[in-house]
Amino acid sequence: MADLPATMNVVELREFGGPEVQYLAARPMIAPRAGEVLIRVTAAGVNGPDLVQRRGHYPPPKGASDLLGLEVSGEIVALGEGTRGWQPGDRVCALTNGGGYAEYVAVRGDHCLPIPDGVNETDAAGLPETFFTVWSNVFLDQTIPEGGNFLVHGGSGGIGSTAIQLGAAMGLNVFTTVDSPEAAEFATKLGARRTINYLTEDFVPICREAGGMDVILDIIGGDYVARNVKAARHDARIVQLAFNLGSKVEIDLMPVMLKRLTYTGSTLRSRPDDFKARVAQSLRDNVWPLFAAGNLTPVTHATLPLSDAAEAHRMMESARHHGKILLTTKN
């Protein structure tokens, strides 16, 4: 810790509200606790939960940093007591419980992953949150029929682009909803078998004509909840990760029973640390080699300096981005 500065730049919130409540500030340097590593941040990913926390509706877990930022990439510069598996100088990307919008962040060592082969360090900041989320909800400990049908809603965003790539890499027929020809082209290049422009097409009959979906990944909610049930085939799983159109809905549960559907979902941040460590190891074993093989690639829409966090949030809220938005500590 002797060679580290006494203070670090961070992005703080003046209050809860719009993107403009974020501002650059200085805080004292932090130290890693037992089992943690201290990372000099190269870049941090911007994610939907950051926006929700900024508005005051997603408080950090007890003991976590109050700063936004759920994923980073960078260089390990110090180890907490008892931390194993890493050394100062290692280049990693990591899932955090907060604190990523800063020049330094302390993270559990078992929530870190090496930068995948063939991925540059900045782009790697956009991997942990969506890959941990999609892998743990869709693939970990699950059996999906070989060549099964996988519907991904919101195919051009961070979760969507990750889910399309993972689904295609796992041999699934990926269907995805998009809102423009540009987004359709983007999703097709990532591996989507069929893109559905939800402004002009109804995904339900398209999915039913294909025999129904084995897995549906939804971030929309609202009336999509009941429509997903119609689009699912028997014994399918519907995974809910967000509710952009609202979480309070009215639904007929009879088809859920008749089709033997599994309706599930989760928020990653509140999961136990040991579970996240297990996901990290599973990703390292099963997914990270796919980057070197060319089956997966990071998808970065834009990279902005940390001081432009407000603009990054505006870009995120516009929903016009294709892939991840990153904040870099280098202006």
Image: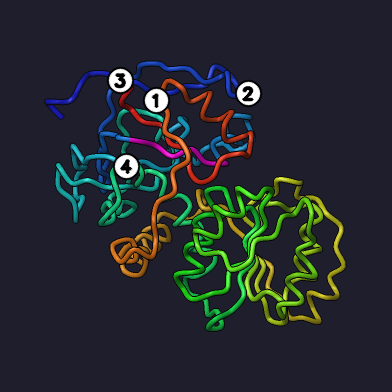
Q: Which amino acid does the dot numbered 3 rest on?
A: Pro
Can residue 284 be seen at all in this image of the molecule? no
Q: CA distance from mark 4 to mark 3?
A: 21 Å
Q: Is residue 103 above or below residue 26?
A: below
Gap between marks 3 and 2 measured at Cα: 26 Å
**Residue interval drawn in magenta:** 43-48
Crowding near the residue tagged with mark 1, few <14, some 14–19, many ≥20 C-alpha atoms within 10 Å: some
Q: Nearer the viewer, mark 1 or mark 2?
A: 1
Q: CA distance from mark 2 to mark 4?
A: 26 Å
Answer whether labels 2 and 4 touch (C-beta < 8 Å): no
The residue indicated by pointer 4 is: 73
Q: How far apart are the two marked residues, 1 and 3, measured between alpha carbons?
A: 20 Å
Question: Is disc 3 surrounded by few (<14), some (14 to 19) or many (20+) residues within 10 Å?
Answer: few
Q: Along the horizontal axis of the image, is 80 left or right of 22?
A: left
**Of pointers 1 and 4, the one earlier in the residue sequence:** 4
Give the residue pinned by disc 2. Answer: 18
Q: CA distance from mark 1 to mark 4?
A: 14 Å
Q: Quadrant of the C terminus?
A: top left
Split into 4 quadrants, where in the image is the N terminus? top left
Near mark 2 (Cα within 10 A), the count class, few <14, some 14-19 or many ≥20, is: some
- Please give the residue where the numbered disc 1 appears in the rendered image: 305
Q: How many marks?
A: 4
Mark nearer the N terminus (1 vs 3) = 3
Q: Which mark, by number, is residue 28? A: 3
Q: Is residue 195 magenta?
A: no
